[in-house]
Amino acid sequence: MKMRHNPLLTFIIAFIISLFSGFADEDSQTAHFFPIDKDGKDGISAFCQNWYSKHLQIMKEHPLPKLAKDVNQEMYRFTLLPTWGDPRSFRLSKDKGNYALNWSRLDGDGGYDPGKLVESASKPITKKDADEFLALFKGVKFFSQTSEDMHRGTDGSEWILETVSDGKYHVVVRWTPEYKPKERGIVNFVKTCEWLLTHASTLGERNAVDPPATHSRVKAK
C-alpha cells in the first residue's frame, strides 16, 4: 500500500524534534561541576548540581573534579549562594609553591536568577596566611565529612566548599552553617569559609579592607 505524503504531519514531527533538540542543547550548555550522589555522601543531588553549576559557569569558573587526576594540584574553592544576595566564589590555589586567591561576584540572587558577572579579582597570598588557612582547613577533617547533611530550610544560604589535593576531590555543602554550628559540628567549616571571604578585597556590598589586589570590573553589555 502506497502511503500519501502529508505536509502537515511532516511539519509537526519536524517541529517536535527541533523543540526537544533545543532543550537538549540548552541543558548541555551548563557544565557539570559536581559529582552526583543521591545519598549525599560523596556528591550532591542532581537538582543542586544544576543549580550550583549554573552560577559557577557564569562566574567563568571550571569544574574541579577532573583536576584530581594530577596529584600536584592543590585548590580550595568556597562558593556562597545566599537566597537573596550576590552569588560569590573564592578560590585559593597553589602554583609552584605560591598561593593566590581569586574571587568572583555576580549581581543576581543565589537562590534565583544568577545575574551577570560584575567582579573578578585576584591577589597573592603570603606563606603565613596560607599556613593559617591550611591549619583551619585541617580542623574541618574535610574528607571524612559527608557532602550533604540533614539540615535544610527555606531561604538562608548555600555554603559550598570544594578541594583538590593529593589526587583527591571532595565537596561539602552546608545550608546556613551559622545556624547551630556547634551542634552540627561545623565550627571549623565556618571558620575556613569565612577566612576565604574576609581575605578577599571585594568591591561589592560586603566590602573588606585588605592589601592591594588586582580587580577586573566587568562592564554590562
Image: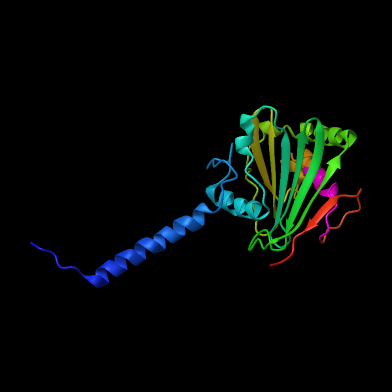
In the rendered image, the residue lying farthest to the bottom is: 8
Is residue 52 covered in magenta? no
Q: Is residue 95 above or below residue 211?
A: above
Q: Residue at x 82, y 34 (%)?
A: 98
Q: Quadrant of the N terminus?
A: bottom left
In the rendered image, the residue lying farthest to the left is: 1
Residue 34: x percent and y percent? Answer: 59, 43
Instruction: State how many labels appear.
Output: 0
Residue 163: x percent and y percent? Answer: 69, 37
Q: Residue at x 77, y 49 (%)?
A: 103
Residue 145: x percent and y percent? Answer: 67, 35
Q: Residue at x 45, y 56 (%)?
A: 24
Q: Nearer the viewer, residue 141 or 74?
A: 74
- Per the rendered image, the range of residues in magenta is 193-204
Q: Could you tell whether 162 is left or right of 98 in the image? A: left
Residue 221: x percent and y percent? Answer: 68, 67
Is residue 200 covered in magenta? yes
Q: Is residue 147 above or below residue 28?
A: above
Q: Could you tell whether 12 is left or right of 174 in the image? A: left
Colouring convention used in this rendered image of the protein: rainbow
Q: Nearer the viewer, residue 79 or 37?
A: 79
Q: Is residue 103 above or below residue 136?
A: below
